[in-house]
Amino acid sequence: MDFDLDSRCARLSVGELADFAAERIGRAAQHSGPWRAKVGTQWHEELRARERATESGALFEVPIRAAVIHRGWRIELTGRIDQLVPAQPPRPVLLREVKTITSALPASAEALRETYGSYIVQLATYAALRRMEASETPLSAELVFVEIATGILQTLPLDRTDELLFSQRLEQLTAFLDEQHRSRERLRGLHVRAPFSELRPGQADASQALADALQRARVIAFEAPTGFGKTGILLEAALRRLQQGHQRRLIYLTSKGTGQLQVTQTLARMTGHRAGEPASPSPAVWQVRSKSEHCINSQFACSPEHCDYLHDLKARWKTGGLSRFYLLDQHPRDLESLRRAGRDATVCPYEITRTALAYNEVWVGDYNYVFGTGTRVLFDEQPGFDPAQTLLVIDEAHNLPSRAAEARSHVVSLEQAQRALSELEHAEAPRGLVRAWTAWTQLLATLPVTDAADAALEDDVADTVRRVTDQLAAAPLPDLPLDVTEILWTMAELDAWLHDPEITRLIWSPRPGELRLTCLDAAGAISSILSRYGAVILASATVGEVSDFATALGLSQPATLDEGSSLLKVTAPAPWRSGSFRVGYDLRVDTRFRKRAETATETAMTVARLRAASPAAVVVFFPSYRYAETVTRELERVRPALRVALQPRSGTLADLQSWIDESLLLADALFLVLGSSFSEGIDFLGGRVTHAMVVGPALPEVNAVQRARLAALSNVPAESAFRRVYQVPGMQKVNQALGRLVRAPGQRAVVLLHCERFADRTFQELLAPEYRGGTALCTDAELDAWLASPPPSPA
């Protein structure tokens, strides 16, 4: 659907109008795929052949185009009628729509109208438009339902009551368009406050540079150090774009719930009403939490067959008064309010979120709602959502390539397949499905352990998956446990994955009975998604070399700024970080995996030396948890009095903060793992730690996936491939960790990079500028002298 608020004109297909619902109650995406469309096409062709045989003179795929004026809006509709049978007195002209379904036929007319209401609306719309276009009255219309599994046909004629559905849907559409018009006026009247009461050095320049870049380029990489105030600057730029009418909606993505909460709180400070100020509109903001967080059942079971909160949603919605969540601007919309309202109305709280989103100008959520393969439908299917009219902001964007690849990777186990087969047999599922699933189970049972499947195995996997999906499309599933149903429908995702041209893939088996379908590189998929949006800001403290960043996202470098896929980098100036770090390169040791055992003692003694030079506890970053454990044991042997706090493997944000607070008081050294939440998401170290050490570049583990990534880059020089697969992600973790140490003017840090590789040119050039040009330390004496020298003096 496309609409112009100034001319009050909307353009959409008849199918879109039929499927339109401003309230998206229970509108979860249905499992389908190319195989489902193929089945539909086959039945359409079959019924055309049958109609031709009657020599009725029927026309097929008849185009129709008409405009309707309703409530001051011009609605332009287009579509194609499946079959138009000319009048044969006494029978009038007949319009016929064919719909393939998996539900069992025959069924009552009431059940068909309840289940397939949008099909009735579509047919009613075609009838109304045909009367307007050809002045054909009388005119009859009918739906022909085809049960895929059996080929049984059932005809449902359109009656006079059904014909009213067209005007009712126009009422719903124009009411929604009126709300979009009010939304536009609300954005125009925004009063946007500055995000900071006092500006730090560099913030004003960064804000202006970002605003200028948005005028010149569509895709921008915005690099600002941790603690700079990046969120406020991004939101100010975004709100101005909405206010000026460049975009109609803002989507702000960040991978952590704490980051999302910070965004909503900052928005409230920048736009919320304050006592003593004239009343001014605020943008409607919705933070999207995961479906499981919304769930109010004792166990998460998201299926109408297993959840009472998903039954009779439309009736319960009205009696529960849940429209208040989007009709009342100041109504609370925090997660607990949603859960409480859902419990009171016996409606799934996630359905409140699904429905309310369309009435909000700002959506805040996780990457998956744009870059996931299943969850993205929540945004994509919102009425009125147009990516081309949307500003997409992605925070911590250095994580996007790995997150997008993870979202496109799958693990299949023989144990799951065997459980599903047992349940299918017990439920007496259709024989074709049982046979196809048996073949899938046998394939997994005989799977060889391999780092990369050969062409024959890949073909077997693809063929067997397709056999299963074809059978799933052919008949409704019997009553099965929810987890088994989910296992079965995962096959549709695997089928799509196996034929996705936008990813680089690896099929492999690390152990008997386990099949992994791994996305090696999602750059093509990322680029394709980003190309849909009117403007994109990719924000990170570690953008690094723009060429590396652009390659990981499938974007080109900014040779010309008007290219839709080019990337323009904006770097926020932070003069207060100049001179805040004193960096040393400890060249006495080699921390490569094969050398770690023989250098563990030297590493442990270096930690002790660093602590002796520091007035308080030091932080030591390791590339892996196992490496940190090894050095911890060595310290217990050579320096038993030195107290080490090794980070816990998991915990809530409050748990992690409490651990850091306690460890800084009671321990001599905190051992953290590069790439973990402590090094990338915990911002409690700035100003509290003055000495830190990084034990080696955090290069990814050498395994089947990394070897496959290297092999996929066989067309580029070996050094460039190694840089992309190993060095860039490893050094990015180092830069992320060190960035947490200096977050504000006046803070400083002494940093020891403990490995001879840090002096190598290829590693040096991947360090952030403030960590380059340090002192090379080749002997114990040089290290001791460096540790004894004065601390850095920040600008």
Image (tube, rainbow, N blue to C red):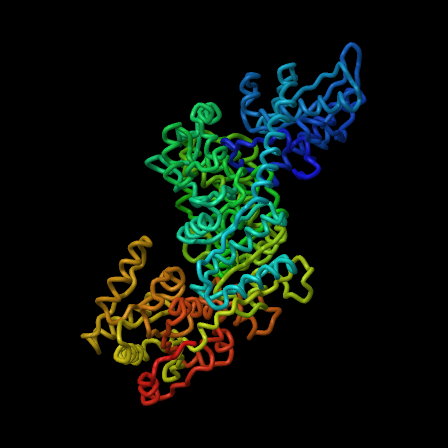
In the rendered structure, the answer to whether residue 209 lies left or right of residue 47 reads left
| Position in image of residue 482 (x %, y %) | 41, 35
Q: Residue at x 28, y 65 (%)?
A: 646
Farthest front residue in view: 276
- Residue 750, quarter of picture: bottom left
In the rendered structure, the answer to whether residue 399 lies left or right of residue 670 reads right
In the rendered image, the vertical position of residue 45 relative to residue 388, given as above or below: above
Q: Is residue 194 visible?
A: yes
Q: Quadrant of the N terminus?
A: top right
In the rendered image, the vertical position of residue 81 relative to residue 702, given as above or below: above
In the rendered structure, the answer to whether residue 120 lies left or right of residue 114 reads right
In the rendered structure, the answer to whether residue 652 lies left or right of residue 512 reads left
| Position in image of residue 102 (x %, y %) | 56, 29
> Is residue 692 or residue 424 the one in the foreground?
692
> Is residue 417 or residue 82 the one in the foreground?
82
Q: Residue at x 47, y 79 (%)?
A: 772
| Position in image of residue 19 (x %, y %) | 60, 31
Farthest top residue in view: 90
Q: Quadrant of the C terminus?
A: bottom left
Farthest left residue in view: 641
> Is residue 654 or residue 519 the one in the foreground?
654
In the rendered image, the vertical position of residue 750 relative to residue 548, given as above or below: below
Q: Is residue 707 visible?
A: no
| Position in image of residue 164 (x %, y %) | 64, 18
Q: Residue at x 64, y 33 (%)?
A: 16
Count numbered badges in the picture: 0
- Residue 188, quarter of picture: top right
- Residue 320, quarter of picture: top left
